Amino acid sequence: MRPDILNPLFAEVRSMAGIGPKLAKPLDRLKIERIKDLLYHFPASWTYRKPVPALDVGDVGQNIIIRLVVMDYKGSGSPRAPTRIFASDADGNYVTLTFFGRNGGWAKKQLPIGEERVISGKLERYGDELQMVHPDHMEPLDNGAAPALAEPIYPLSEGLTNKRLGQLASSAVENIPALPEWIEPSLLAKRVWPDWQTALTTVHRKDDEAARDRLAYDELFSNQLAMRLVRSALDRRHGIAIKGDGRLTNALNLPFDLTGAQKRTIAEIESDMAQSRPMLRLLQGDVGSGKTMVALMTLLRAVECRMQGALLAPTEILARQHFANLRQMLSGLPVNIAILTGRDKGKAREATLMGLADGSIDILVGTHAIFQEAVTYKSLAVAVIDEQHRFGVSQRLMLSRKAKGVPHLLVMTATPIPRTLALACYGEMDSSQLDELPPGRTPVETRVMSSERLVELVEGVGRHLASGKQAFWVCPLVEESENSDLAAAEQRAEQLRLRFGDKVALVHGRMKGPEKDAVMEAFVAGKTQLLVATTVIEVGVDVPNASLMIIEAADRFGLAQLHQLRGRVGRGAEKSICLLVRSAHIGETAAARLKLMRESNDGFRIAEEDMRLRGAGELLGTRQSGDSPFRVATAEQVRAMIGIASDDARLLLDRDGGLDSGARGQAARLALYLFERDAGIATLRGG
């Protein structure tokens, strides 16, 4: 149960005075649902004002506060012309207050001729005159409402003004409870950080680096502490020691030799699984580095011990592809492999469930459906999770309850993760890297071209298809709307069909499973040659005859996603090309991304650069790849403090007695609840 002291922070924001249905909508769009969300909705920037006694050209470009007397009005009579109001300071210097649109009449009411007002706004030069366009503050001297010298500027949504959000934040700040300190005292003193209550109050009242760093650290610390608690809870529970005899792994008829990286990783995994302590290992492998083979070897070790293995994929397309690939690799071996997705119904599903329960199915491949309550395993010993960022701590705990002992867990990602971000997201895991490509895989040649050469590009695609080869054409990210992205893909597919007819197919995320599978199967079989797609094909699609990848409006994609898409080609012996079609005019950051893609096929270098250019929140953010674990901490703060937070969490648990010992342990328990890392506390009860 959440401690009572935190309840005011988790109260609904609608309970605040003055928030009705009209104001609730823009707050919902900003994901401000509770008081806590409002408090952690920090200003994006600040407006600073300078009080001045008189007008001075030296202050042009600055926001000033000044007392002015209104002298005269001027308007042309046309509704399109601005209203100009002339005012002077105590020294007789003039300034023009300019109002565009329909604000003129309102401004005249606020500024009667002959009256003195406190005015604030940005002082500008217009020809030989000084002017202020739409002053932000115009008040009589006697109302005492002087503008603040520093005003926070918040991220907003339509229907919500900065002034109103600032008022709500100020009201929430007044009721922040005092919480005990969870940061290690020597670290707090070294960093000269304020306490939590002071820091949260300060960030809404001034631009304070120490306060922001402290609050970011709180988030990082609670994240690391929760992961360490999960790991220690799993370590306390017995797994199943797996020591395969090699009868299946040695019988695999491989058409190629394993790379040194694959052999090293398989040895690390086998060493882990031979212990009763459950394996929890992250396998990072660049596109095409051979992760599927490592996964198969891992699963076969369990089968050699008459146990079961499971492979979970993030999408149905990828699950069915894994199933097809593994079944082909296992051809001739006495291994029963099955698939289970949300689409499987009726007798086929029942037969699969029975086979899992009686142990006749050795390996199960599927989507999240394989961990539903109705799915019971006779002897699940190892699970392989593909694409870690879609499978969080709570799913790991759910998985651990599917076996008599805690199953060994291998988590794979095809997006190489920067070291600091790996520590932040997967800090409780051991880590392996596949940093070699299998022999025979040639790097994909990457070229950048302007969208202005689209006609030339289509002609080149025609020559490519005429030679019997296949190609992908990925349509642009239009906006954060699947409908808009789909419309772009449908339009491009229709245009290409006018040129290439039935050779063109279309696949997108809104298709139903069977329809999507039919399109993909036709493309894999070579019945269609040009697959137009939204980013649904990003992960895992394997078509060796496809040797051309076109990514339209590539400047709108992140580096990690471009690298993933590029990895869909170069899977056969044919030399492959990736064409990044850029918009006619792009910014510096987008140009730098495309330049790096042209220069490098190294996914680890690309991931580091992606984090530098876009930040941790977007690298694993919902807009591109999955969920970021952080709301407060920026990429720079993650890099600077994640290692310190990890060490601090370890010290609390290993040296200071953990959450049940002393005042700091009790305070750290509050931090876990505050940042909703409850899974960590759940392990104390259930582990």
Image (cartoon, helix red, strand yellow):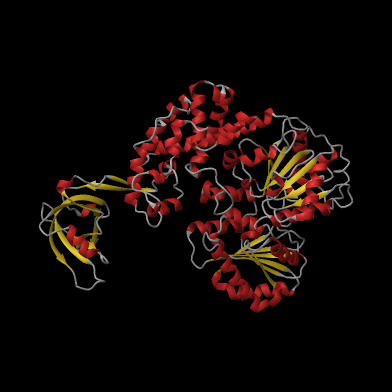
User: Residue 654 appears at what percent x and percent y?
Assistant: 59, 24
Q: How many marks?
A: 0
User: Residue 322 appears at what percent x and percent y?
Assistant: 75, 53
The quadrant holding residue 683 is top right
In the drawing, does residue 51 fall left or right of residue 191? Answer: left
The quadrant holding residue 458 is bottom right
Q: Is residue 589 placed above or below 404 in the rendered structure?
A: below
Q: Nearer the viewer, residue 472 or 42?
A: 42
Quadrant showing the C terminus: top right
In the drawing, does residue 504 fall left or right of residue 159? Answer: right
Residue in the image at 26% along x and 66% along y: 102
Residue in the image at 54% along x and 72% along y: 452
State whether residue 126 appears in this view.
no
State whether residue 554 appears in this view.
yes
In the picture as drawn, the residue positioned furthest to the front comes out as: 346
Residue in the image at 58% along x and 28% along y: 650
Q: Is residue 622 placed above or below 209 in the rendered structure?
A: below
Q: Is residue 342 placed above or below 457 in the rendered structure?
A: above
In the drawing, does residue 410 fall left or right of residue 605? Answer: right
User: Residue 512 appears at what percent x and percent y?
Assistant: 67, 62
User: Residue 669 appears at what percent x and percent y?
Assistant: 52, 29
In the drawing, does residue 208 fall left or right of residue 553? Answer: left
